[in-house]
Amino acid sequence: MVPSTIKTNHLSDTDEEGKAGQWRKAEVLEDWKEQLISFPSMFNTNPSDGPVVIEAPVANCIIRNIYTDTGAGADIMYEHCFVLLPKDVQETMKETYVPLASFTSEPSWSEGSILLEVVLGKPPLKRTTNIEFLVVKANSQYNIILGRTALMTFGAVTSTVHGMMKFPTPGGIATLYAERQKTIECSQVTKAIIKPIIHDDGSISPNLQFPDQKIIIGHTLSTACKEKLYNILVTNLDVFAWQPSDMTGVPREITEHRLNVNPNIHPVCQKK
């Protein structure tokens, strides 16, 4: 049995009174959190190779297309989902500049962080807790990514082979099943390659939402090389700034635009 308090003889450097033997609180692990989580035999289930994509109430809104990713170090809400939340909820977002590294190790910056209530399961097997999400502006077929932090908070274990996620509740072990149809749709989106607009002068418009913004590729390159460049551009559209609103969220200590003028000289307005 874990005691509710423990005694320590550690002497804090900041303790002005210099008293040893301070009593500190220790978290008591509730019995229901120690329940055994198990999955059925593979011979009694239909194996799956897709991601575990679920739906759940978040901030009192039913959010579909939530990807449970045990490899993600952060809990992510994409901006296209964030803007659909109620205005009073959006206003609780805090400014935070956290660098996020993708599998290419290229950092991107979050728009901010927001603490939201997440509900998993249904009564009597239901858990409710607050999860802090980083709001990210990027193209994604998902609305939310539940990373290792959220899964640890819920004590959840996911199995892509079984297509399910399990976690303990005071009423027993809850099981959430992956949205099979939505998983198939997400896989199709991932594999689809968007063809850019190729103009008569040889330039291309990789972003179909901004056809007037063109990129010129050298005409001396081979057709195979051009095709590879096309694919790189259309699959990395989020790297480029297509409109002024895409340039927000960069801390001033990282980069800042300024005029190279003498700050001691003030502008003079000439009267006509």
Image: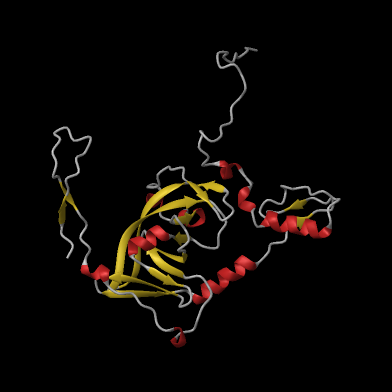
Residue 98 can be seen in this image = yes
Where residue 116 sits, quadrant-wise, is bottom left
In the image, taking residue 201 as reference, residue 95 lies left or right, namely left
Residue 249 in percent (x, y) is at 51, 42
Nearest the viewer among 102 and 110 is 102
In the image, taking residue 175 as reference, residue 268 lies left or right, namely right
Nearest the viewer among 152 and 109 is 152
Q: Residue at x 14, y 45 (%)?
A: 22
User: Which residue is outermost to the bottom?
Assistant: 44
Q: Quadrant of the N terminus?
A: bottom left
Residue 84 can be seen in this image = no
Q: Residue at x 22, y 57 (%)?
A: 27
Q: Quadrant of the C terminus?
A: top right
Residue 3 in percent (x, y) is at 15, 60
Q: Residue at x 46, y 60 (%)?
A: 144
In the image, taking residue 26 as reference, residue 265 lies left or right, namely right
Nearest the viewer among 76 and 222 is 222
Q: Residue at x 80, y 60 (%)?
A: 224
User: Which residue is outermost to the right?
Assistant: 220
Where residue 184 sits, quadrant-wise, is bottom right
